[in-house]
Image (cartoon, rainbow, N blue to C red):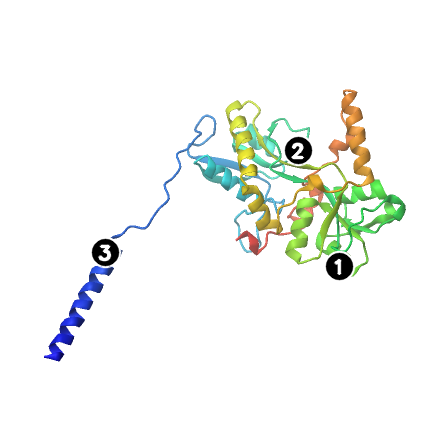
Amino acid sequence: MKRFKALACCCMAAACLAMVLSGCSSQQSYTPPEKSPTVATPTIGKDGTLRVGVNSASAPLAGMPSSSSKIVGIDVDIAAALADSLGLKLEIVDVGTDPESALKEQKVDIVMGVKQSDDEVKFWKSAPYISTGVALFSTSSNTTVPTKSSVPKIAAQVSSTSSWQVTNEYGDDSLVPENDLKTAFVDLAAGTVQYVAADAIIGTYAAHGGGFDAKIVALMQQPGGYCIGVSDANAELKQIISDAVVSLSGGGIVSVIEAKWLGAPIEVSAVPLTDGAKSAKTNAKTDTAQGGTADAAKTGDGNADNTTAATDGAGENAVEPGSRAA
C-alpha cells in the first residue's frame, strides 16, 4: 500500500511539474516596443533610417579594428544613440575626409567629427557634442604647466599639428618628434620627456588603452570640439540635430560613451591654458572686437593631427580601436 501511495505522489508531482513547465513555455518573452520615427523624407533621405557619415581613419572617433570590417568608435556610438532617440535605424557611411561632398550629393543625412574651428566648410555645424583641444599630457605626479623659459622636453607625433604647436610656443629644442603616439607615451613613462602633446581625445584614448600613467595638465589652444554637420538648406534637420545634441549631452549619454572609450569623460573647459593659449585668447578677443578673425582659431582643435592619416590609416596617432569597441 505504501508503495502505491509513493507511486501516486510521484505521479502527482510529475503532473504538477509538467503544468508549471507548460505554463512557463506559454509565456512570451518581453520585447521593448519600437519607437515611432519622429522624422521622415524629405528631411532625411531614407524613411526609417538615419544615414551618418564618419571618417573611418580617425580612431577613436571612428575606425576599424584589424579583426573586423565593422566601423566602431565614439562617433558611431553617439550616432546610434541619436538614431534611437529619433526612432530610426542607423546606417554608417565612411565619407573619409570629404564630408562636404557626401552631404552635397545626399549620400548621408548628417556627418560627424567636424571640427568646431573649421570655418571653411560650406554646411551648418551643431554645437560640439564632445570637447577637445591640443593638450599636454604628463604623469600623475606632475601638475606643472610648462613655460618657454623652462625649455621642457615634449614628445609629439612627427608632422602633426601637435608637434607644430610645440615648436610654435616652446621652440625646436623642446620638440622630441616620434613616429607614433604610443612611442611618445613610452618616452614619458621612461622619463626621457616631461610631456606629450596630442589631441585631448586621441591622447587620452592612447594613454588609457596602453595603460600609461598620463593625464592632461594643460591645453595649448582654446578648447574646441567635434560637431555634427547638416546641409545648410535643411532647416528642419538642423533644428532636430541641435535639440538632440543638447539632449544627449545633458542626459549623460555622451559621458557614458566617453567613459567606454576613454576610461572617463573628459572636460577640457576647466583645464589650465599654456601662455601661448592665453595669448591666443587675448588676440582672438581683440580681433573679434575689430571685426577680424583670429588666426588662432584656425590652428585646428579636434582631429587636426590627421595629417598622417593617409599613411597610418588610423588618424593622428596610429591608434586602433581595441577590445573596448566590442
Foreground: 173 or 2?
2
Closer to viewer: mark 3 or mark 2: 3
The amino acid type of the residue labelled 2 equals Gln
Mark 1 or mark 2, which is nearer the start of the sequence? 2
- Locate residue 299, reporting x and y percent: 75, 35
Q: The disc labelled 1 sits on which kind of residue?
A: Ala
Q: Earlier in the sequence, mark 3 or mark 2?
A: 3
Q: Mark 3 highlights which residue?
A: 23
Residue identified by numbered label 1: 189
Q: Nearer the viewer, mark 3 or mark 1?
A: 3
In the depicted view, which residue is nearer to us: 134 or 112?
134
Q: Secondary structure at mark 2?
A: loop
In the rendered view, does 34 fall on the left or right side of 291? left
Q: Nearer the viewer, residue 311 or 157?
A: 157
The image position of residue 133, as x and y in percent, is 71, 40
Q: Which residue occupies 65% across, 45% down?
A: 266
Residue at the image point whose x is 56% and y is 56% from the top? 323
Residue position marked by numbered label 2 in the rendering: 116
